[in-house]
Image: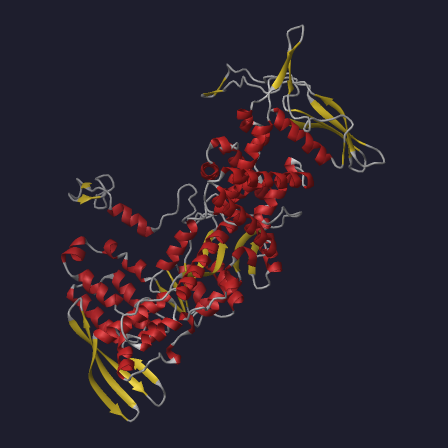
Amino acid sequence: MNVVSYFIYIFFIAEIQSGENINEICSSQVLEAPNGSKSWIPVVDESLKPVLKTCFDSLDHAISMYSNYAEAAGFDIRLTSKKVNKFGIVQIRYVVCSKSGVPKKTTFNPLEHSGRKKKIRNSNFKRCDCKAGVKFRLLKGVGKYELYDFVEEHSHPLLSSTDMCFSRKRRQLGFGDKMLVHRGNSLNLGASRVHKMRTTCKGGYDFCSSSTVDFQNFKRDMDKYVVDGGDAQMFINMMNNRKDVAPNFFFDYKVANSELVCTFWADEAARFNYSEFGDVMSFDATFRTNRYCMVFIPFTVVDNHKKSVIVGAALVNKEDGENYIWVLEAFLRAHGKAPLLVLTDQCLAMKQAIAAVFPNSRHRLCMWHIMDKLPKKFSTELLNGTSFRKEMNKIVWDVQLDPEEFEHKWNVLMEEYSLSGDKWLQALFNIRRSWIPAYFKHLPMCSLMKTTSRSESINSFFNSFSHYGNTLVFFVNCFDAALDKQRFTQRSLDHVTKSTFPKFLTPCKIERHASDIYTRAVFNVVQMEIYKATWNCSIENVESEGDVNSYKIAHKDKASNLKCHHKVVEDKKQSIIFCSCNSFIRCGLLCRHIFKVLLNTNVEKIPEKYILRRWRRDLIPRDLQHTRLRYGDLDEEQEKMFNEVLSTVENCLGRLRCHKEDLARFTESIRILKKEVDVSFPNENASSSKVNTIVDLIGVSQPDNVEVYPPTGIRNKGCGKGKRLVGAGEIASNKASRHKRLCRSCGKLVNHDSRNCPNKVT
């Protein structure tokens, strides 16, 4: 059930309850004794008033009866004394007015000062020794509870109908309110914001008795329940429960000195996504997602809609080679195969782990992170006053260059600007096989990701759901909410592909065929290639040698108004066609040059061998995209009925909102049903109900034995505790940005003075 549905549900129930209570609350009769004291007797419907010697099937029904009477009369109740036999059965139970008893004595002097703050005197008290209440006792041999004492008079005024919203019973959170607090936490919405949304949807504060503090207190109680129960152990138990319910759910963890060190998990949908789209993978670390400062590592691939999807996630307590090796080994156990290409930033620990665990995979460094350092390494005169930056970007990002061409152009550029001796550029050239596109040209799908921007986007996406104060249990709930949104996006894109029709740009039948096999996002790319093949490309020369035809294709670039030439080779005997631009290998889609040849030979369909499965539509099974039901958190049939009731009530309210009489009849029918529910399911004990609700919401209970504890003493670069760790590059950058001043020792504008000048003679 979504959050909006709960808002509607709560609003509707509130309307029924508020209307019902206003009709039942009556005035009170005031009696004055000869000594001047007053007492108040509620004037309520006789059917609600307790009757002596009435028997009840259970103590819950008895307490519920008096609670309904108290609400109609205008006061709150409190459970007090009880007598329990040796079998744990309650024999006697007292239910009194909430103002029963005497106020506590003041234990401090309000005029005393403690430090700089003055203690505020609390002069208000609620108890006034009211004697109103009822007493129940268990009848021997019958098993029923009898009302044997009833005091009707109160020693204080009773609440009016307009003030009943401030009563304790009305302020108690219902299950829908608690669900909203929990769901809001999963969406990184604080309790205060959730309360504002709930108040607005209910129609104002008159219909919302619970305060912001009540919502905050329940959020506090949930956090305390998890922390007191052993957060790490509850997290492990939750994941193991998912493994029991969903056999294809993978989860593993590592413990050292009874503390959680590493953990990795991937559900069935993530494993399926990796089996289809796991040729190129990127992963990066993000921080401040939980209160223990464990580093969160999502693994990202590109799906058939060209969207980023998660194929696994990990938490580690430290970014070192040992932890990364364990995580990648767990990744290999979950998915069974290594990716062809792994993309990361320049983290040395990641590099060592990839080489150790994925020896047959190519490791590629993020080009953006490397090129972003260019302004920090060279002067603005060189970068802005010359064409060095433009020429550098041109040879670095060019996907058409061969390794020999790149090396030649690099050396020419270095000689032109006299940078052959620069250590940083020489270091980049030495690792050119790890980041320059020319060295990945013949690797399948190498152009799918050249930077870690997708990983950083995923990190930002998850950080919008999570909060640095989350426990591990609630972090998983936030992760599930983010994953649910991501997979709903997949479903919506599938729906768009199936239910809509593209606007064709050419009369070619091959364009129609492409729209039938590809997802809409991929088709848009292929369609543009077909369009440019039709109107922008031309065949300048054809050479035939047996069954092999060689085409010289000219393509006019509108931006530069220059012609580019590419060679397309077609082997009809082996049904092979290849272009010198290498587009099919780099991104898995045919280029405009090949489409020009296919159109010239009247081919109406894309050859089957050039249609990659990863780009096809209807590839992901629909049942894998429902997160909560996959984990077995809810009974599917029960969830369906629950949502059906909510949608039915919402539909009826929408139709009857302008018909007062019909709405009144509908409301009366709901009231009758509510009374039947109250009889069958009376209110439970408040403390046990709160614990049971928390367990239902978070999906795991406190363990009997705690063997694994959360990590302590984590000091990673993004932990945010105290003074964070700063790298040498950032220190140098900060020094360079400082305001320079004149040093009297060396006579230069620098970042030091005569006291610490390196040229100072000692």
Residue 762, compared with residue 363, is above or below; it is above
The quadrant where residue 35 appears: top right
What x and y, as percent, mark residue 271? 50, 65
Closest to the observer, 195 or 497: 497
Closest to the observer, 20 or 108: 20
The quadrant where residue 126 appears: top right
> In this rendering, does residue 313 appear at all?
yes
The quadrant where residue 373 appears: bottom left
Of the 4 image quadrants, the one containing the C terminus is top left
Residue 5, compared with residue 518, is above or below; it is above
> In this rendering, does residue 76 appear at all?
no
What x and y, as percent, mark residue 345? 37, 59
Instruction: Please indicate whether residue 462 sits to the left or right of residue 525 in the image.
Output: right
Instruction: Please indicate whether residue 556 sits to the left or right of residue 70 in the image.
Output: left
Residue at (22, 40) in percent of width and height: 753
What x and y, as percent, mark residue 154? 65, 18
Residue 733, compared with residue 46, is above or below; it is below
Colour scheme employed for the rendering of this structure? secondary structure
Closest to the observer, 544 or 70: 70
What x and y, as percent, mark residue 430? 30, 67
Task: Please identify the residue farthest to the right as the structure is shown.
Answer: 141
Residue at (47, 31) in percent of width and height: 205
Task: Please identify the residue farthest to the top as the structure is shown.
Answer: 34
Residue at (55, 51) in percent of width and height: 644
Residue 271, compared with residue 203, is above or below; it is below
